Amino acid sequence: MYILFLFLIGSFLGWLWENLILGVGNSCGDTFYTVFLKICLPFLNIYGFGLIILWFIYNKFYKKIDYTKLIVLSTILISSFECLVGILSNNVNHKKTWNYPSSNLCFGFISIQSILTWLIFITIIFSIFNKLNI
């Protein structure tokens, strides 16, 4: 149940980030919801899965490695996840679901700015996990 809560929170916060802060998202969320379920929901699944991955990384390694190394490792893993999902989405949908046109990293699916944004988000998220003793 806890993982479902993390998924919903992460998906909604990701939707908020892209729509309200960046102004680049789809107001109906993921293609999954609009095409397959025929409903409009304010969720972006990649952020939900990303938060679950971060929770597992945090719980597995928090007491085992240096906190700074944990944040850097997590940033690398989440950026790799973003790249992998971008490639898979491109191959399944035959179109780029997102793109950083000025970046050559991972065929334009990640950028230096997105990696730095993840670094900031992960630092905040791990701080919250630590305070909540998750």
Image (cartoon, helix red, strand yellow):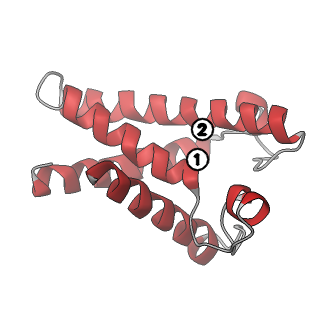
Would you place residue 56 above or below residue 65 in this image? below
Q: Earlier in the sequence, mark 2 or mark 1?
A: 2
* For residue 68, side relative to residue 48 (left or right): left
What residue does disc 1 label? 114
Q: Residue furthest front?
A: 37
**What type is the residue that disc 2 sits on?**
Glu
* For residue 100, side relative to residue 123 (left or right): right
**What type is the residue that disc 1 sits on?**
Ser
* For residue 1, side relative to residue 103 (left or right): left
User: Relative to the observer, which residue lies in front, 58 or 76?
Assistant: 58
**Picture residue at 12% right of the left edge, 57% below the top:** 132
**Picture residue at 37% right of the left edge, 54% below the top:** 4
Would you place residue 42 above or below residue 35 in this image? below
**Picture residue at 69% right of the left edge, 72% below the top:** 39
Q: Which residue lies furthest to the top in this view?
A: 64
Looking at the rendered structure, which numbered label has been put on residue 82? 2
Residue 65: quarter of image: top left
* For residue 26, side relative to residue 77 (left or right): right
